[in-house]
């Protein structure tokens, strides 16, 4: 299959919202993206070892003078969504005004979420519902989109195989856009295998990949189905992300996709190919498409092991916000080895007055 570098534009109809081929094309030569999970881990380990001394002994400064410390050094901001822009279905106060001021200052903005429950079209609707309807579709990236991009980039469709989904509608919606067949997902939420005497679960031998995304309806049937496809049929094991916890609501933290992926790791002994943060996929795409200078890109997120690590391991600036899952105590603890350049309460601090 031959892909083009088609432009990501908001005017595309949502039925074909941003061709995944456009996203995937720049990565045909990217070994970091198409490598096995063990290779990815090797890259991360190598970078972690190189920066470990810095991380262990670095003192993290709270953002005090955002103009000189951040804005003057940054052309592009990449924002995580959950815990940074919103919590659950509640917009964090002040966000629309802060994003507007960043645009007025000439900054490029992108929004990258590891949550796979929605497609890019679905996330565009969420932004709109929260009053952020000025954000164009081409600025939004989800891990469901990244999973589809990975399959497109590796020419999965040419194998004639299909995908089994542990996850919600977002993954299937993105696979529909690239015409990759799939089964599972929400359709299997109420199924139970025959676990009586002599009971077995029969799987489709044409399943060539398992995609594991966040799934509020995960069950034993789905876990067993994935286990059989991977262990007995050599299906690829792909994870949208490894987030430990997530914000289903603004009232508390909830178990994240790391728990779903962990179940499949536990019964297969296999490590997944991870396509969401901190995988380099997103930054390689942005760098290739827009010709950006990595040193002038800042990753802003609420997680140390995905957002900040995405920044530090890919040569970006990074800011941790305390509006999500990471507390100040955790960030500054002796056990933490992942340090951002700065931290602040939320992104409204980007325009806060300096305390005298």
Image: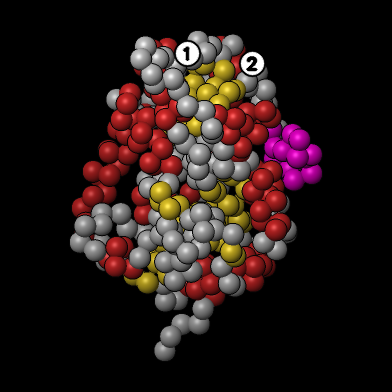
Element type at mark 1: loop
Q: Looking at the image, is 283 positioned above or below residue 1?
A: below
Q: CA distance from mark 2 to mark 1?
A: 32 Å
Q: Residue at x 43, y 42 (%)?
A: 257
Q: Which mark is residue 50?
A: none
Visible residue check, residue 24: no
Identify the magenta region. 7-19
Specify the label residue 202 is tagged with.
Answer: 1
Counting from the top left corner in percent of width and height, residue 176 is at 67, 28
Q: Earlier along the polypeptide chain: callout 2 or callout 1?
A: 2
Query: x and y percent of residue 264 in the render?
Result: 37, 30
The residue at 69%/29% (across/down) is 177
Q: Is residue 271 above or below residue 242?
A: above
Q: Residue at x 24, y 63 (%)?
A: 333
* Pick the front one: 247 or 297: 247
Nearest the camera: 6 or 254?
A: 254
Q: Nearer the viewer, residue 30 or 20?
A: 20
Q: Which structural element holds mark 2?
A: loop
Q: Say whether residue 206 is left or right of residue 257.
A: right
Screen quadrant of the N terminus: top right
The quarter of the picture where the C terminus appears is bottom left
Look at mark 2 in the image and give the residue it sits on.
Answer: 1
**Extreme front residue here?**
197
Q: Is residue 13 magenta?
A: yes
């Amino acid at each position: 299959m031959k892909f083009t570098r088609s432009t990501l534009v908001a005017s595309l109809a949502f039925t074909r919202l941003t061709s995944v081929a456009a996203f995937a094309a720049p990565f045909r030569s990217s070994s970091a993206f198409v490598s096995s999970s063990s290779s990815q881990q090797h890259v991360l380990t190598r970078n972690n070892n190189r920066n470990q001394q810095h991380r262990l002994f670095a003192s993290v400064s709270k953002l005090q003078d955002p103009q000189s410390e951040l804005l003057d050094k940054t052309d592009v901001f990449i924002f995580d969504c959950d815990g940074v822009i919103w919590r659950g279905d509640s917009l964090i106060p002040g966000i629309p005004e802060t994003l507007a001021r960043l645009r007025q200052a000439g900054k490029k903005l992108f929004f990258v979420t590891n949550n796979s429950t929605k497609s890019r079209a679905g996330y565009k609707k969420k932004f709109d519902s929260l009053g952020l309807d000025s954000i164009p579709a081409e600025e939004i990236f989800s891990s469901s989109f990244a999973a589809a991009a990975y399959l497109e980039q590796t020419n999965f469709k040419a194998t004639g195989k299909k995908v089994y989904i542990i996850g919600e509608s977002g993954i299937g919606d993105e696979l529909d856009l690239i015409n990759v067949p799939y089964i599972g997902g929400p359709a299997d939420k109420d199924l139970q295998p025959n676990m009586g005497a002599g009971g077995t679960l029969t799987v489709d031998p044409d399943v060539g990949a398992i995609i594991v995304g966040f799934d509020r309806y995960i069950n034993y049937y789905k876990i067993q189905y994935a286990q059989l496809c991977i262990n007995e049929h050599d299906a690829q094991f792909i994870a949208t992300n490894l987030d430990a916890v997530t914000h289903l609501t603004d009232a508390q933290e909830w178990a994240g996709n790391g728990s779903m992926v962990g179940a499949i790791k536990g019964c297969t002994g296999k490590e997944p190919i991870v396509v969401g943060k901190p995988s380099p996929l997103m930054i390689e795409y942005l760098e290739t498409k827009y010709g950006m200078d990595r040193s002038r890109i800042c990753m802003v997120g609420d997680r140390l092991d995905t957002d900040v690590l995405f920044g530090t391991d890919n040569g970006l600036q990074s800011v941790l916000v305390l509006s999500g899952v990471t507390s100040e105590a955790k960030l500054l603890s002796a056990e933490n080895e992942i340090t951002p350049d700065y931290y602040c309460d939320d992104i409204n601090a980007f325009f806060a007055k300096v305390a005298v």
